[in-house]
Image: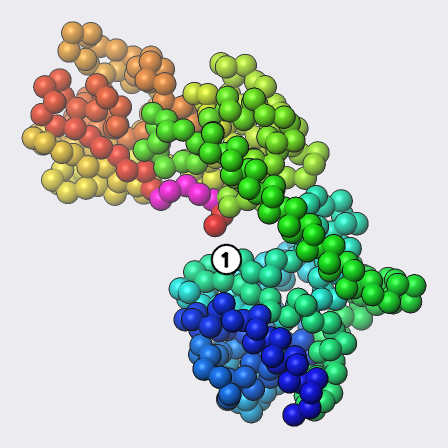
Amino acid sequence: MSQPTIDLAARLLLNLAPWRNAAAWRIAFSGGLDSTVLLHLLASLANAHTLPPLSAIHVHHGLQAAADAWPEHCRRVCEGLGVPLQVVGVQVGPGASIERAAREARYGAFVATLQRDEVLLTAQHRDDQAETLLFRLLRGAGVRGLSAMPRQRPLGQGYLLRPLLDVSRAELEAYAAQEGLSWVEDPSNDDHRYSRNYLRQRVFPLLTEQWPQAALTLARGAAHMAEAQGLLDELARIDLAAATSPGAFDWLGLPSLTLAPLQALSPSRQRNALSHWLTAMTMLPDSDHWAGWDSLRDAADDARPIWRLAGGELHRAGGRAWWLSDHWLRSVAGPVEWADPAVSLCLPGNGQVTLSGKLPAGPLCVRYRQGGEVLDLPGRGHRDLKRLLNESGLPVFVRGRLPLLYRDGQLLAVANLPGLDGDAGGSWQLRWQPSGQDRGLS
């Protein structure tokens, strides 16, 4: 083995040093040049070092006839290296961008496969990083987007790691030639209708002709942007800490922020904090769409503004901004008969309810608001439920999901609201645990 090969292997091992105690290393193996080199390097290192168990995963998109032969090629390569291979077929959904749809399907397969504390290793390199930066710059991305591809990030139950981001495509090509490796060529790589192919084959040759170190310089710029984004994230955490005070309805399990501390910030700091907070729950809006935040923030106290985002909505109620995923926004069906009040009752799509204390006599059932409900309160008589809910301050978006306990058509209690959630003597109480913790994306 010659010196360049040793150098590349040593660099890879150094980059992977913090991950030597991972439960397993899984290699995203397309069969192309880059992932073939990564797989070969890791298999070679495993012969000389104690590494986590190695395996490869090939995602078959089925988008072109040539790809049908790739799983068998990947099997032969993995068998020759003694690395177990898993082939996963996916369906690529329709969309304006086939590249994006294929990527989402591919990473969906990775998330489903990755187990706790396992690491997925992908073979993106320095030239890919430079192309990503230029591509996002042309799309008007901000600092987060111009950070390009992170070296590591959480993925499903494990982590995604890109250990070759400091390696050039030329170095990978030299290694493959030196080791006599074979790989598949994706015919779509020659299709200039795809933006990345156009950048790689038409734009970058011109850039490197004038600036030979263009890829290295652009990758360095992405690293500077990543550092700047790290500082913005630190600022966001400081600002969000002031806006995460406890509220009366924390039992809902819904992400929320207190508006007043955010409103005291400059508009740019507001957007920075909100972006950091929303990242785990939804795709971030583009610049023009941020007008929805301005409308929600500046609405009158008695208004009910809604900011629609991918996969959910931001609502305003009780001086707070609330994130509601599409799961929460779905309507729930009732009534649900409660045959055995001594046992918690599961509500379809809406968590469960429990009765504590001396159980009221049945037959009992749980219903949801239809309008016009009346609750009999000792000392107050028959009171309109709508007015009682207004007095409680319960956000309007919760009211259609709030479990109501009935017996023979009579409303007995309203879950979780003090003074309304049981009998007058406090001998029993109705508790509701909403389904999941509504966090949207994760």
Q: Which residue is under mark 1? A: 154
Q: Coloring scheme of the render?
A: rainbow
Which residue is the extreme one toward the right?
210
Residue shown at 54%/26% (left/top)? 262
Q: Nearer the viewer, residue 436 or 203?
A: 203
Q: Nearer the viewer, residue 144 or 100?
A: 144
The answer to whether residue 59 of the structure is visible from this angle is: no
Residue 34, given in percent of the width and then of the height, sits at 67, 75
Q: Residue at x 52, y 32 (%)?
A: 239
Q: Nearer the viewer, residue 33 or 15?
A: 15
**First to last magenta residue range:** 436-440
Q: Quadrant of the N terminus?
A: bottom right
> Is 217 displayed left or right of 142 in the figure?
right
Residue 181 to residue 408: above or below: below
Percent x, y of residue 333 = 34, 36
Type of the residue with mark 1: Pro
Instruction: Name the chief secondary structure element in magenta.
Output: loop
Residue plotted at (82% across, 62% down): 214
Query: Is residue 17 covered in magenta?
Result: no
Q: Looking at the picture, how far across and down is residue 15, in whole percent?
A: 58, 70
Classify residue 168 by image quadrant: bottom right
Q: Is residue 442 visible?
A: yes
Rendered location of residue 163, percent (x, y) = 60, 69
In the drawing, does residue 41 fall left or right of residue 85? Answer: right
Query: Helix or strand or loop: what does disc 1 sit on?
Result: strand
Residue at position x 51%, y 88% in the image = 48
Question: Could you say which quadrant of the image residue 421 lies in?
Answer: top left
Q: Report the front residue among 100 and 270.
A: 270
